[in-house]
Image (spheres, rainbow, N blue to C red):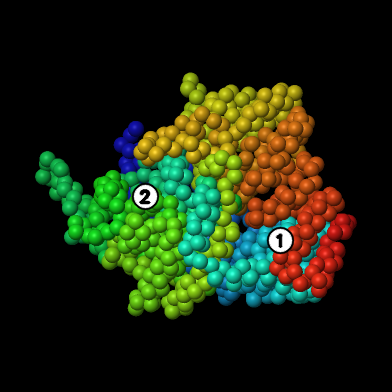
Amino acid sequence: MSTTDSEQLIFRDNVRNFKIWDVNWQLKNGNLKVNSPDARGRTALTDSAWLGYAAMSELLIRHSAEVNAIDAIQTSPLHRAAWNGHAATVWILLKNGANPNLPNGIGRTPLHASAGNGHVDCVKLLLDYRADSNYQDADGWSPLHEAAMRNRSSKALNMLIRHQGAQANIDLQTLVGQTPLHIAARCGAKLAVCDLISAGANVIALDNSGSSPLHYAVTAGNQDVVSHLLKSGCNPNQCNVFGFTPVRLAVFFGLTNILAQLVSYKEPYLAFLLTKTRDRELDWSQNSDERAFSQELHEAMNAAGFVTDRARVMAAVVNCEQDILRARWKSESIYIVGSYAECWGNNRSRMNGTTDLKSDVDIVDLNRTALFHVKEQCQCTIDAQHSLVAAAMRKHDARNTFEYFQGHLCISGITSKPAQSWDGFSILRPATDLVQAFKLCTYPRIQLLEPGYTTQIPEDIIEQLKCDLKNYPYHVVKAAPPGEEGKKCRGSAAFLENRLLRSMTTVQGQVYSVIKDLVKEEISKRAIGLRSYHAKTLMFQLLDKIPRDDWKVENFIKIVRIALEMLRTALLQEPQSSKCMSHFFFRDAPLYLKIDHNEKSQIAEAVAAIEANLIGFLRQFKDQLQPLVGGGNLVFHPFMLVPDPSPPSLNYSRDTPLYYYEVYTAVRDALLSLSSAESRDVGHRDLLRNLSKIPDFARIARETLKALALLDLGKNDEAKKILRACLGHQVSKGVPISVNDPSSDPELLKESVKRHLESVDSAWMFCFVFNKPLQLSMLPEYARQLFPKCILYVNVYYLNFNALFKFLCLDQSIVNTSTSAVWFEDSLQSHDSQEVLTTLEFCRDTQLKAKLIRRAAGTMADQINDFQAIWALLAKDPELIRVCTQLTIDEAVARVRRTSPEAVQAGGEQRFRDCQQPAVRPPLLVQ
């Protein structure tokens, strides 16, 4: 390697690590190519913009960095900055000539990226610089469609609608006729629905299937959205081309509460009966004995898996996932943190390894070389024999030394957006936040760990926390207090928090899960401002103050009440309007409310309202718990998180099989090869040879890919032979709790999980990013939208190889009736739309299909193609319609009888049956 190449690598590393002094020196004194791309086509400015380094970006531009440089996926620095909400960097790029309307490889502009992620400051800047608010991507989506998907993008949506001179077309349609209101309705984005309607959106607009926004809101089970659409004039009897009205869809899917809304305009008495049960239960529950209900709630949470044995195995699973990510990204500085890593509170219904749609997985990417020093607290020593070297190092460190105040490092030039967000689409593919972080040379004062501090946290946990100070670096993330964005970075105690929450007992973990749920699901409905982190801090305070012996089941509700009272007191006692309480580990650091928070007195009133009716709300929480079925394995699909658009290439010529982490790239390479239009004979021969390198821990994926290649070559008999050989094969359904050994330390338990993954077929679900749309032409036409399935934008794909294998076997008629019946029955427990739709396509058991249909609303809430696929299946099966309808009628009538027996004598039951009769008729397709 030449000196110039070496300098170039150092230069790029310095840019990524925010060594702005070093970069400045290199640009002035070195022979650098500032626009030289890396293997992914990214320039130094692309990296700087992606990371939100405003000052660094300005420096690079001053030295002739190309602001419109395009990488391998045709993405510019402005795309990168806009995606992550780095407003200061966006402004620097725009004022230096960046093109705000430059589309990437899938037709998306920077305005699409910022609008979809809710970055209102970036949206305003882009519109000010004449970004086209009606620019449509490859699927016809405008920035307004992107903003309509999420409540968090409400401000961005309003900016697009109301920006002077650049107002977005509020009823612009996609290629399939969807308006932004259609998108908001099916995604359950209530704020977006309200804002669009207030701005004059057409509530009766129909897409290419003749469906209104109400059709999608009903199918998705979005009760609040349905209510608002009805009030705004949506017709519950509008018929689409499948012959279905919203009323009929509510019946088919068994959505009784939504059905009550839809019929209330002409049968208010029926609506009252259908919704009365829940209110009665709440009234009754206030008379419950708290100690007795504590036991009842504890047992229900035990049945749902909220116990320490499962938490220990889940921690090992997370540690295993972390190792796989580190190997994939070739970095030891990757850490999984947050509720997923802490194992409690990331799924409100059960602890089975999955993450709620409202939660996410946080991954910290700790900068490997940058080290910031804290002024007046730094105790670093320089071990250098030569005094000149030591002096140079001190000078260098002085440039990276900053003031530290109230939990924040005072550093300018870094945009205050802590995470790069990837949206989730199901509990099997949760949303993910990738957090960029910088190491500090020392931890600040931690009162909890000082000699003489009195705490109820066990001594062994305190000692482990002290060890963590040595083993895990203190770090700051790109977040700042209100009004100080771009001037400070917030300190994080994520590693200490992880340790403390993983040490909890079963009762402690259950109490924390309840407190977090009350904050997220109940208090936040009544007043905006609290975050999940406030619930976590309350839990730390409880662990600190309540003796270990008092953490008993009979005290469950009592401790929850204590937490709510602590929260209300903190809100009322803190004089500053934006502050809520103090950080638990760093007592001088305040915790802030959300930016658009209500008055603290209003939040405190919401807390008091929950406390006053606590048993009722806890009963609701208990009722939504889902007992574990079967063996209660922990769901684990390690290749579903953070799809990599450009993974490192593999050496297929080596003699040894692929490592576990390499399977991701191997499967991705195979799919690209199968979708290529180049020479199939040569390409598929190489593909089959490369697939032989994949071990049996990805057998079903490997063999299915082989079968696809052979089908593509017209060798159907050989493909069937491969498929038949796998008919008796079982993929892994998760990590069994039996891997847990109470005597094992976390490292040994992690190794046990790894051995399990490699001993079974565990790698069969994948999420990928491709540079262009992917299609497997050897599949039947109706299956190409399903395998693989585009889940985000037009280039993020998901593939369940077990479902694809079953589809191929059923399509090729090589599976017997008994085996297929088992497959269909198994799909009733699945949250995967590819398995569900495969069953609906091939199963002939109408009762089973009806049960599956009624589960589908929650399973497929974000997928428009899934909705229409189910509607089409219903439309051609009148018997399925009849069974679905009858199930709903029977359930609703039974509910009426339980709620109000007198209603039966008053004719309520018959009136309900009569009200549903129009939905029983087979639909007539519009010609």
Question: Relative to residue 655, is residue 567 drawn left or right?
Answer: left
Q: How many numbered marks, from 0 up?
A: 2
Mark in the foreground, 2 or 1: 2
Question: Relative to residue 585, is residue 810 drawn left or right?
Answer: right
Q: Which residue is mark 1?
A: 255
Going 44% across and 79% down the picture, which residue do you hit?
Answer: 601
Going 71% across and 30% down the picture, which residue do you hit?
Answer: 712
Going 32% across and 59% down the picture, which residue do you hit?
Answer: 547
Amino acid found under the numbered disc labelled 1? Leu
Going 21% across and 52% down the picture, which residue do you hit?
Answer: 397
Q: Are marks 2 and 1 in contact (CB under 8 Å)?
A: no
Q: In the depicted view, which residue is nearer to us: 802 or 790? A: 802
Q: Is residue 134 visible?
A: no
Q: In the depicted view, which residue is nearer to us: 463 or 332? A: 463
Q: Which residue is mark 2?
A: 503
- Is the residue marked by circle 2 packed among few (<14), some (14-19), or many (20+) residues within 10 Å? some
Q: Position of residue 861 (x, y in %)?
A: 65, 56
Callout 2: helix, strand or loop? loop
Q: In the depicted view, which residue is nearer to us: 683 or 502? A: 502
Amino acid found under the numbered disc labelled 2? Ser
Distance of mark 2 from mark 1, alpha carbons?
A: 40 Å
Q: Position of residue 583 (x, y in %)?
A: 33, 64
Q: Is residue 729 visible?
A: yes
Q: Position of residue 339 (x, y in %)?
A: 45, 53
Q: Examine the rendered structure and indicate whether residue 654 appears above or below residue 549.
A: above
Among numbered discs 2 and 1, the one appearing first in the sequence? 1
- Is the residue marked by circle 1 packed among few (<14), some (14-19), or many (20+) residues within 10 Å? many
Question: Relative to residue 469, is residue 256 drawn left or right?
Answer: right
